[in-house]
Image (spheres, grey):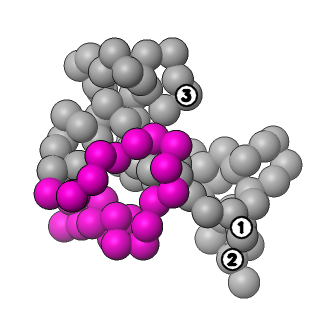
């Protein structure tokens, strides 16, 4: 049921999957993965600076972009890249980017 959506996201450059040949549809997303999906959905806007704590990580630009755009403001806990991303946070991030 999700094949067309995943194919679209790959074609749009929003996801590369969890490997060259898998998507892991039953997996739980991390904060870094969700923010990266949104960052890519916006065309990977330029990031003026990468936050030092993200330096050298695959999510450095996207998580820095999220911080620069105040996407984490209002969330009652720290947004750690490797932490599971609750559904409420996903919708909140989408709201901050798409509304």
- Residue 39 in the figure: left or right of residue 59: left
Residue 92 shows in this picture = yes
Secondary structure of the residue carrying numbered label 3: loop
Secondary structure of the residue carrying numbered label 2: loop
Q: Earlier in the sequence, mark 3 or mark 1?
A: 1
10 above or below 46? below
Q: Residue at x 29, y 35 (%)?
A: 65
Q: What residue is shown with label 1? A: 25
Queried whether the magenta region covers residue 91, the answer comes back as yes
Q: Quadrant of the C terminus?
A: bottom left
Alpha carbon of mark 2 to alpha carbon of mark 3: how far?
A: 25 Å
The location of residue 86, given as percent across then percent down, is 43, 67
Closer-to-camera residue (6/34): 34
Q: Indicate the quadrant where residue 28 lies.
A: bottom right
Dot label at residue 49 = none
Closer-to-camera residue (4/91): 91
Q: Earlier in the sequence, mark 2 or mark 3?
A: 2
Q: Earlier in the sequence, mark 2 or mark 1?
A: 2
The location of residue 75, given as percent across then percent down, is 22, 58
Q: Which residues are magenta?
A: 74-99
Alpha carbon of mark 2 to alpha carbon of mark 1: how far?
A: 8 Å
Dot label at residue 2 = 2
- Tell me whether the residue at label 3 lies in contact with that at label 1, contact meaning CB atoms closer than 8 angstroms: no
- Tell me whether the residue at label 2 lies in contact with that at label 1, contact meaning CB atoms closer than 8 angstroms: yes
- Residue 56 in the figure: left or right of residue 25: left
Q: What residue is shown with label 3? A: 58
The location of residue 84, given as percent across then percent down, is 51, 57
Q: Residue at x 72, y 47 (%)?
A: 18
Q: Residue at x 29, y 46 (%)?
A: 78
The crowd level at tag 1 (other Cα within 10 Å; few <14, some 14-19, many 20+) is few
């Amino acid at each position: 049921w999700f094949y067309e959506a995943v194919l679209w996201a790959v074609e749009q450059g929003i996801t590369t999957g969890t490997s060259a040949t898998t998507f892991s549809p039953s997996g739980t997303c991390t904060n870094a993965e969700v923010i990266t999906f949104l960052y890519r959905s916006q065309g990977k806007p330029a990031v003026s600076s990468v936050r030092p704590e993200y330096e050298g990580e695959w999510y450095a630009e996207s998580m820095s972009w999220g911080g620069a755009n105040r996407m984490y403001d209002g969330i009652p806990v720290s947004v750690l890249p490797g932490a599971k991303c609750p559904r409420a946070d996903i919708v909140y991030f989408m709201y901050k980017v798409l509304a």
